[in-house]
Image (tube, rainbow, N blue to C red):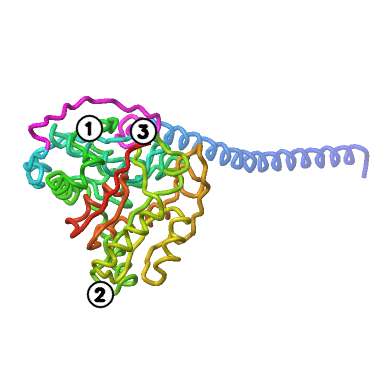
Amino acid sequence: MNLNEASKLIKKEQSNNAEQKQTNDKKAIPNFSEKQKGVMINIILIIILIIFLIISLIIYIINNKTMNIYLRLFQKQNYTLTLPSNEKTKYDISLLDEKKICSTNKKFAILRRTTCVPCGLFSYYIVHLGCIINYLKHGYIPILEVGSFPNVFTGGKLSDDNPWEQFFNQPCGYTFEEVVRKKDVKIFECVCVSDMPDEKTVYSNNIMRDYHHQIQEKYMGIKNELLLESEKLWKNLFGDSKNILGILLRGTDYTSRRPPGHAKPPSINRAINDTLKMDDKYKYDFIFLATEDYKIRNKFIKKFREKLKYILPEKPVYYNYDRKNFLSFNIKVYGNMNFMKTYVLSIIILSKCEDIISARTSGAAGVFILSKGFRNSLVYYLGEY
């Protein structure tokens, strides 16, 4: 092979190598571009999805009434609406026509009692009952709400549901969740009004008691599940017995803190002696005691033994005698729905007893409102702190 031929051969190989390299480069470029294109498409899709979600959320917040109501609730933006109470219609029987009232009233009012953090469950009960009457008279369908601010139901936490509805029905069959979705909804502060039952006189004023008894049955009745549970409890405690004496006594913060304006409870010995007198006269099958105070309970157990019946929360609650705080602030009571449930069940059972002995408390007012009347009642009023 001469030099020219060798040179031509080298040039041909170099040309072939260049062509092969060019071919390989052309093959590599499309592969890299496809991967890059796939990544870019995914990134673009994610960005579009994020933009879509943000826009959807903005539209939802703007147009969705539920979200707006909840935001207003948790921001505590209550309005105080002054609705005058008319003494002439104080026991207005027209409110007992539930079908007419519920079909006539078209406006909705969410009522929140945010100004009484230490108040107990049945303090809420009697104030709520008055607010229901007052707002119904003025053309509103009231809805009671206790989940969006600190109180005995929620403790220091807030809840996006409504613990009130675990115990009581709402007026006219609406639930809180349904009402917050409606267009014509306003939020108001629930305040004490003259339409509420008077804690000092409901025990002796039969007209007041009967009226509020009927109102609560139609507009704020106890949940059916709790009523059924109370019937089972009654059967377990008393069997078929009907001749039961109910006793409601407060201790703890009532005796240690002596809150101003609250009725003074009787001494334990006085309550026991009065129980003995009534038992001697009416020969009760059983005595049912409702109290949060272990000192009171233990003394009654020692005196009446197997004849005494009571119920306790599933998880026992022990109390400290703290002169600075109310019972509702006790760490094992504040926001303890198990304790609240036991309390309500005790009040229901007391309302079904034949006779009653009680100090004047919001719980006692609840007992009388829920009851259809007692054969005999002894309600202590020994002045106020």
Give the spatial CA distance, label 3 vs label 2: 43 Å
For the residue pair 56 and 315, the one nearer the viewer reads as 315
- Disc 2, SS: loop
- N-terminal-most mark, 1 or 2: 1
Q: Quadrant of residue 111?
A: top left
* Lower sequence index among marks 3 and 2: 3
Which mark sits nearer the N-terminus, 3 or 1? 3
Residue at the image point whose x is 35% and y is 38% from the top:
262
Q: Please identify the quadrant where the C terminus is shown.
A: top left
User: Does residue 239 appear in this view?
Assistant: yes
Residue behind mark 1: 193
Indicate the quadrant containing the N terminus: top left, top right, bottom left or bottom right.
top right
Q: Residue furthest bottom?
A: 240
Q: Is residue 356 above or below residue 186?
A: below
Q: Which of labels 3 and 2 is toward the front? A: 2
Give how far apart the Cα atoms at labels 3 and 1 are. 15 Å
Tell me the residue that label 3 is attached to: 114
Whether 76 is among the magenta residues is yes
Q: Position of residue 283 (x, y in %)?
A: 26, 70
Give residue 240's mark: 2
Classify residue 127 by image quadrant.
top left
Camera-side mark, 3 or 1: 1
Secondary structure at numbered mark 1: loop
Q: Which residue is drawn at 68% across and 42% down?
A: 28
Tag in front: 1 or 2? 2
Q: Give the range drawn in magenta.
A: 62-90
Name the quadrant containing residue 60: top left
